[in-house]
Amino acid sequence: MHRSGAGSKFARLVVAGAAAGVLVAGVALPTVGGAGFGLMAATERVNLAPKDLVEPPPAEVTIVQDAKGHEIARFYEEYREAVKLDEMAEVMRTAIVSIEDYRFYQHGPIDLEGTLRAFARNLQSGQVSQGGSSITQQYVKQVLLNSAGTDREKNKAVEASYTRKLDELRYALAVEKKYTKDEILEKYLNIVYFGAGAYGVQAAAERFFGVEASELTLPQAATLAGAVQDPNATDPHLGEEQRTRLRERRDVVLDRMAELGAITPGEAAEAKATKLGYRGTRLPGGCEASEYPYFCVYMRSEILADPRFGKTARYREERLDRGGLTIRTTLDPAAQAAADDAIRKWVRPSDDPVAAQALVEPGTGAIRAMAASRPYGGDAARNEISYNVVADAAHGGGVGFQAGSTFKTFTLLSALNKGMKVDDGIKAGAGYRAPAYSAFQNCAGENVGDPSHVVTNDEGSPGWKTLKTGTWQSVNTFFMELEERVGLCDTVRTARSLGIHRSDGRRLQEFETFTLGINEMDPVTVAAAYAGIAARGRFCAPTAITRITDGNGRATRYRPACRQALDPQVADAAADVLSGVFTEGTMKAVGGIGRDAAGKTGTTDDYAAAWFAGFTPDLAGAVSIGDPRGSQAHKLTGVTIGGRYYGSVLGASIPGPIWRDTMLAALRNVEATPFTPIDSARFGGCDQGCRPSAPPAETDPAPGLAP
């Protein structure tokens, strides 16, 4: 089944050269001691029956795309992109056949002339010093080498032994029965190593010259054809000595092509006069090379940890790095640009505190953007950060930052779920002390109240506070009273139902100050929780992947993992209350975004970190800022960030404006979706805690104070 493919120009040239008797010599077998006859007799006795070759697909590059189909990252164990034979320049095919196996389209599975000549010379030298391998045999060797899982197996695949050589011949017989000559050449050019980290002709063309395999010129093709003989010795990336060797090898190929009549002597001379032209195009791969490294790290971590993508972690990693997959992700380039621009406006890469933001789509959990103020990487001189500050530890992140008053939202939801109305209220004092240890119980039923600890207000004022005004002003003592009323465990359960978990992977800390945000969080988790409120209580686990297509074109789609976490009307009522944060509360000075929006500022105790989490029906987001050197040791007080001095950083100082600027840009071309109106009959007015007839005067928070 070895059809010659002689209709192509390069095949005709090689056939014509061979037919003209170019370098067709007799087999010079040694005669001393009858060694030549002994060899011939030995080969007749050898069983050269075809032996099926197991051909696992060679490692290929996995391409990661954004939601629009644009490439954003690559993963590979070996940088390789398989292409069809007609996608390789004809001169490349001519060059490789000329130098490696000029009789490839004429001989059968074994080039008997070349093989016997090599065997004879090996006998003379007493060792395997010459291969005499056809392109088919070289392909077999590459398959065996790529199939080897250990160093021992790799050494065995290339060992200098007659046993290995005879096995190679048996495999070659089977390969040539299975494929046409063109198919074998295509497979060979897609698997062979060219040096400089490039496997296969497409990767080599990009790496060496910055072009496609179909665009290779004569000197470029000759260079690559020359590199396959000893790719390490001629690796141009290693230095000038190797480049000199590669150029010399290129010229050998050009001379050989002219000798065979594939090119004219003049074309060979002109090509030899050119410079090597090695560009050393950077290999695109890994998350550090991605324009969106934080999202890339999240996506890779998701694949490696999720059994949906493979039964074992090792299988998932091999599939990702070797499988030639095309991974379509949820990343929206417009939303990502909006997040990047907004952070860049308020925080500089050189600042010690780092701002991080995640955008999540309500109703799907699709992560639309992940951004941070500091570049990702390990270069301390560039102030790079070496972990995913936007995500939790399971997705390449760290310990996170305490979420502060963004957690008050979960207590608000619990109160609404228990039947409280938006104008129900509680008298909040200047300080709060638990009346007993039993005033707060965690979800294990343990008493965790702390009568010795006094909670004070960082913002707002004491007095009568309703669900509305207590939330708008973010009054700590009000929320401690409210959490005592609705129950600590119920508040924790509400948070968990919306996907809340600690960034470091440890159990949530269930203490009385849970509502004040004592747990360390990451922006993705908080954004996804708020997206659940925006979707009328339907929580969807954050996800970065929508589809994976394998190398054979088979596509697997991945559906969002969603559940109804809240009563839809409870979520609507919470959105109604939280929308007042922009018009009546801590974000009033910052302003809204010209469409229905809701959110909550968050400042931690003693200004260790600051947050803003908010949502529209179309997009939710969370922004954090803190010092990764240690937020408790490096407070956000008396600091210069983004070229501006802050006596103290609050939720509305930096995170709130970043969120506002991001949403304005990200939703510019998105038709506004309104919130579902609050069920006034169920949640309007007051019931359980109406304002007393003669309440204490309620005052506004001091100017400039916001959580």
Image: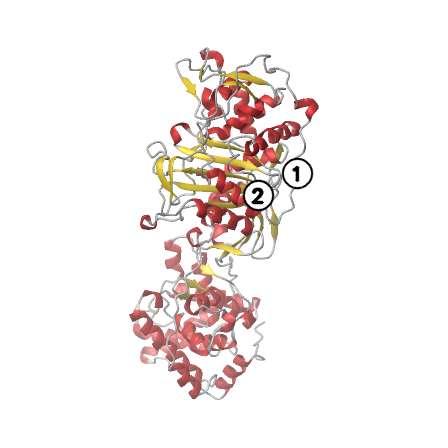
Taking the image as shown, residue 680 lies to the left or right of residue 92, namely right
**Label 2: which secondary element:** loop
Percent coordinates x, y for residue 237 in the rendering: 35, 65
- Residue 166 visible at all: yes
Mark positioned earlier in the residue sequence (1 or 2) = 2
Residue located beneath label 2 in the image: 366
Query: As displayed, is residue 65 above or below residue 532?
Result: below
Residue located beneath label 1 in the image: 674
Q: Quadrant of residue 121?
A: bottom left
Query: Residue, x 50% and y 43% (percent of image)?
Result: 302
**Which numbered dot is residue 446?**
none
Query: Residue, x 40% and y 16% (percent of image)?
Result: 453
**Label 1: which secondary element:** loop
Q: CA distance from mark 1 to mark 2?
A: 20 Å
Q: Amino acid at mark 1?
A: Pro
Q: Are the residues at dot 1 and dot 2 in contact (C-beta closer than 8 Å)?
A: no
Q: Quadrant of residue 419?
A: top right
| Scheme of image coloration | secondary structure
